[in-house]
Image (cartoon, rainbow, N blue to C red):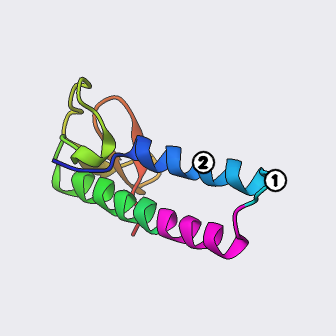
Amino acid sequence: MAKNKLSDLRDHLFETLERLKDDDKPMDIARAKAIADVAQTIINSATVEVKAMDAFGHADPSEFFDRKNASALPPAKAGLDGKGSPVLTNGKSVRPTTQ
């Protein structure tokens, strides 16, 4: 089971913001930057995971996305939009693919 969830990342980032704004004892800027850099790496990793799920038609996200009670999305299908551009669709929404 995943130890940290997307909601935990969000909480850490808001805590960092609050500590940066603390007039009495503000967080060191270099430390805040390091936290933001790590958070961006985690977000980039999650983005790749979502794109891979779309590409391979997997409907269930990892535990990182904290979707205990959410229903799974139908598998994505690749196709072309009306202009001939590649898109992915799950039957409810369409989005351009990134290549």
Residue found at the far right of this picture = 23
Amino acid carrying label 2: it is Glu
Q: Position of residue 46 (x, y in %)?
A: 36, 57
Looking at the rendered structure, which numbered label has been put on residue 95? none
What secondary structure is marked by label 1? loop
The earlier-in-sequence mark between 1 and 2 is 2
Q: Is residue 23 above or below residue 33?
A: above
Q: Residues within 10 Å of mark 1 (few under 14, many from 20)?
A: few
Tell me which corner region of the image, top left, top right, bottom left or bottom right, holds residue 8: top left
Residue identifier under label 1: 24
Q: Residue at x 77, y 51 (%)?
A: 22
Q: Position of residue 23 (x, y in %)?
A: 84, 52
Residue identifier under label 2: 15
What secondary structure is marked by label 2? helix
Pick the residue in front: 42 or 54. 42
Q: Is residue 39 left or right of residue 36?
A: left
Q: Residues within 10 Å of mark 2 (few under 14, many from 20)?
A: few
Q: Position of residue 91 (x, y in %)?
A: 28, 31
Magenta residues (range): 27-40
- In whole angstroms, how far apart are the C-alphas of marks 1 and 2? 15 Å
Q: Residue at x 57, y 52 (%)?
A: 13
Q: Residue at x 51, y 44 (%)?
A: 11
